[in-house]
Amino acid sequence: MNYTSLAGELQSLVQGSIRTNEPMKKHTTWRIGGNADIFLDPSDKEDIRQAVEFARERSIPFTVIGNGSNLLIKDGGIRGLVIKIGRGMATYSIEGTRIKAGAGMILPELAAAACKNSLGGFEFGAGIPGSLGGAVVMNAGAMNGCVADVLVSIEVIDHNNKFTVIPKGELGFAYRTSSLQNQGLICVETLWQGHAKERRQIEQETKEYLAKRRLAQPHGYPNVGSVFKNPEGDHAGRLIEACGGKGLRIGEAEISTKHANWILNMGNATAQDVLTLIETIKKMVQERFGVLLHLEVRVLGED
Ligand SMILES: Cc1cc2nc3c(=O)[nH]c(=O)nc-3n(C[C@H](O)[C@H](O)[C@H](O)COP(=O)(O)OP(=O)(O)OC[C@H]3O[C@@H](n4cnc5c(N)ncnc54)[C@H](O)[C@@H]3O)c2cc1C
């Protein structure tokens, strides 16, 4: 396919910016990933609808990403079109105890907006750097709170390129997952339900919670937070640590010495370094404990 001419055609349909051969490492918190053939930074949900329709009509594969904070993009990059739902779609409005927000807003911004308006329920999101769309897909959560607790509904672009509202009950939420992970729907807007809570109390709880996170989590090197889901009744980090995994390194990818469920990019780690480390960890944990770890991180792209 001639992606340069397709990119030109698509640019005439959307307001947002289009680039070709875009390094995806610029768009993941791991700072890892090959190039995307065509990359769209949409300015609104109609841009996304146009782009998806354009791709579907021409059988161009497309991929939607948010803040790239739960993604491993392989070294060969992503074929076709990548749509990054980010800053252009980060507006919000508040009515009573409900917040409507674009899928590109990030969870800490939602938590801050809620706090400013004396709305509780969003404190868990203050330390999670995901976009609201990505957070819904992953049912992101921490410290006894998660997306499913406060979400009311989302607006998606469906398989017929139409905007449709889906209520929370139809999103198949469970631990770090939702039915959106397999449905090919694109989340463009979100509606949340908070509850009245004193601003000072929210601020205090958020401060304590962020301090706890800072103590427990590594910083200084690019990462995606936890790599594996916790197996029922246990912690992936505990199992990896018990196998002597802390500090284990392949190429420039290293298991954090602070938290064994985090893999850090120590410089120029490749996706292959990370994938090899992931396989090594899985084998170690399975052999020692008979537990098969499952990835929380989503893997996209080509070798
Ligand atoms: C320092 C750090 C700390 C973290 N702590 C936590 C934590 O405490 N709890 C937790 O749950 N997670 C945590 N994470 C992981 C991550 O932030 C969450 O999983 C977050 O929800 C991912 O959102 P994102 O926008 O970055 O999604 P991405 O990583 O961009 O994408 C994730 C998946 O969602 C899909 N997707 C993204 N946006 C959309 C959309 N609008 N419509 C349809 N599909 C979409 C992508 O295709 C991909 O499959 C942490 C990450 C980091 C770097």
Image (spheres, grey):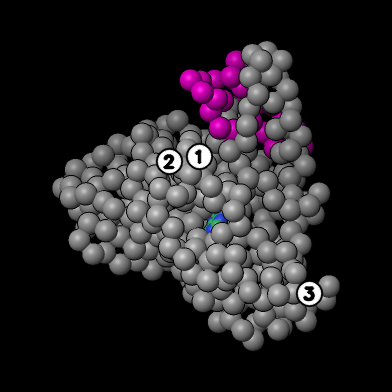
Q: Nearer the viewer, residue 45 or 225?
A: 45
Q: Are marks 1 and 2 in contact (CB under 8 Å)?
A: yes
Cα separation, mark 3 vs mark 1, equals 35 Å
Give the mark nearer the N terminus: 3 vs 1.
3
- Residue 93 pos. (x, y %): 30, 67
| Amino acid at the residue labelled 1 | Arg
Residue 116's disc is none
- Residue 121 pos. (x, y %): 28, 45
- 10 Å crowding of disc 1: few (<14), some (14-19), many (20+): some
| Amino acid at the residue labelled 2 | Gly
Q: Is residue 59 above or below residue 133?
A: below
Q: Which residues are magenta?
A: 227-255
Check disc 3 and report the residue beneath it: 3
Check disc 1 and report the residue beneath it: 176
- Determine the secondary structure under disc 2: strand
Q: Residue at x 39, y 44 (%)?
A: 148
Q: Nearer the viewer, residue 186 or 80?
A: 186
Residue 141's disc is 2
Label 1 or label 2, whichever lies nearer to me, is 1
Q: Under 8 Å from ligand 1: the CB of mark 2? A: yes
